[in-house]
Amino acid sequence: MQEKENPLGLDALAGESHKGADDAAALPVRLGRYSRAHHRAIDMASFARSAGDVKTAAKLDRCGHYLVFRDYFTVGKVRLHAADFCGKHLLCPLCAIRRGAKLVKSYLERLQVVSQAKPELRPYLVTLTVKNGCDLGERFRHLHHSMGKMTQARRSYLRGKGPHVEMAKAVGGVASYEFKRGTRSGLWHPHSHAVWLCYEAPDSEKLSSEWHSVTGDSYIVDVRPIEQADPVSGFLEVFKYAVKFSDLPLGDNWEGWKTLAGRRLVFSFGDLFGVKVPDELTDECLDDLPYVEMLYRFFKGAGYSLVKTSDVQESTVESIPEWFNHAVEAGWSDEQILRFYREMQTRINGSPSRDRGINGGDPPRSGGEQAVYAAKALDGAPGTR
Ligand SMILES: [Zn+2]
């Protein structure tokens, strides 16, 4: 169980956001990362169960239990095509790294567009902290409220209605709220990491005194330039906030989720406002390329194991997501899922099915037909484990 002790966090997000993260050669490392993440989620599920939240526990247990990858062997890329994600990224590191990587990618794309239009802009990593405290909810509200005041002061200056503030040097920015627990004090330590795009470097002394007058109790800030050649590093700092929850002891992680679930922990302004981040946690498909589909299953202690590989697929027909999540939700056994998976593969390949299939009937061709077929099969499934 060595894997469990390996830290998740920034490294995991960096690995996931790395340019070659979807290289076929990187798959073992990637599966190792997902395995550590899911082991933690399983521990979290046990904690949730002991806290009486059986529903959340079940979602965490199921999240990433199966992973369907597509190996686009002609270009050496492997994409995550389907999985039953729980979407609770403050509790589940797998969802946190998947979501974090989507955020990094989307903001990098926007940064490229902004930088082309305004090549003189430089990115800065700006960290603002508030004093430690024992009540997480109270400290979060304090940080959130203070940040609101800062953004308001920036807006007032830009409209000619207030004095200059350092934040007004930022033409745009994106920030997150992050939470640590002091190792010695045991107190909550909320802070915010931001990427600011500025023509002129923010002055940390001035920023510190502005922050102190806004918060009334806190003055610790940090400003550092982000290497232009590697803007990813700044975004990783900002978007690691959810993954960092898995650094906390299970009880603190649970408390953090209870306190902060549903809160917006990322916000942006100016030129980085309104960036669209895709909701789905799977990868984008590579259209019109042949692929082999691989079904992996999670085994506690051992990690992910390949349980089935399809024949070469020429078509890009969407099939797996139509039924996969429903099947897991309906409580299908591994054996049922594998049987159905094989059946669908045969049908998508276009070769005539030798047996009559799960419910019989003609082979479905279109995505819609497949969904209907899957729904029929699900109805007929005993749903026992
Ligand atoms: Zn999850």
Image (cartoon, rainbow, N blue to C red):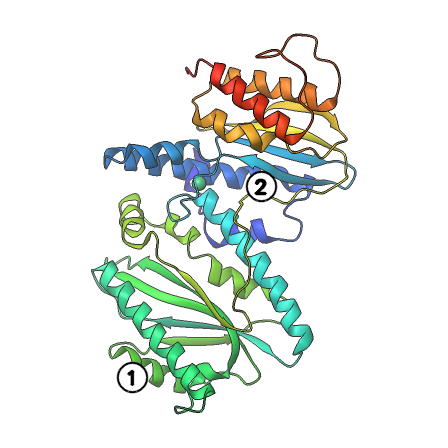
Q: Check the image and report above or below for 240 versus 334.
A: below
SS at circle 1: helix
For residue 318, the mark is none
Assign ligand 1 to one image quadrant: top left
Quadrant of image for the C terminus: top left
> Can I make out residue 36 in this image?
yes
The residue identified by callout 2 is 30
Q: Position of residue 293 (x, y in %)?
A: 66, 29
Going from the N terminus, do you reach mark 1 or mark 2 first?
A: 2
Q: Check the image and report above or below for 384 versus 79.
A: above
Judging depth in this view, the residue of 131 and 328 nearest the camera is 328
Q: Is residue 15 left or right of residue 39?
A: right
The residue identified by callout 1 is 213
Q: Is residue 81 left or right of residue 52?
A: right
In the rendered structure, which amino acid carries the disc numbered 1? Ser
Judging depth in this view, the residue of 329 and 297 nearest the camera is 329
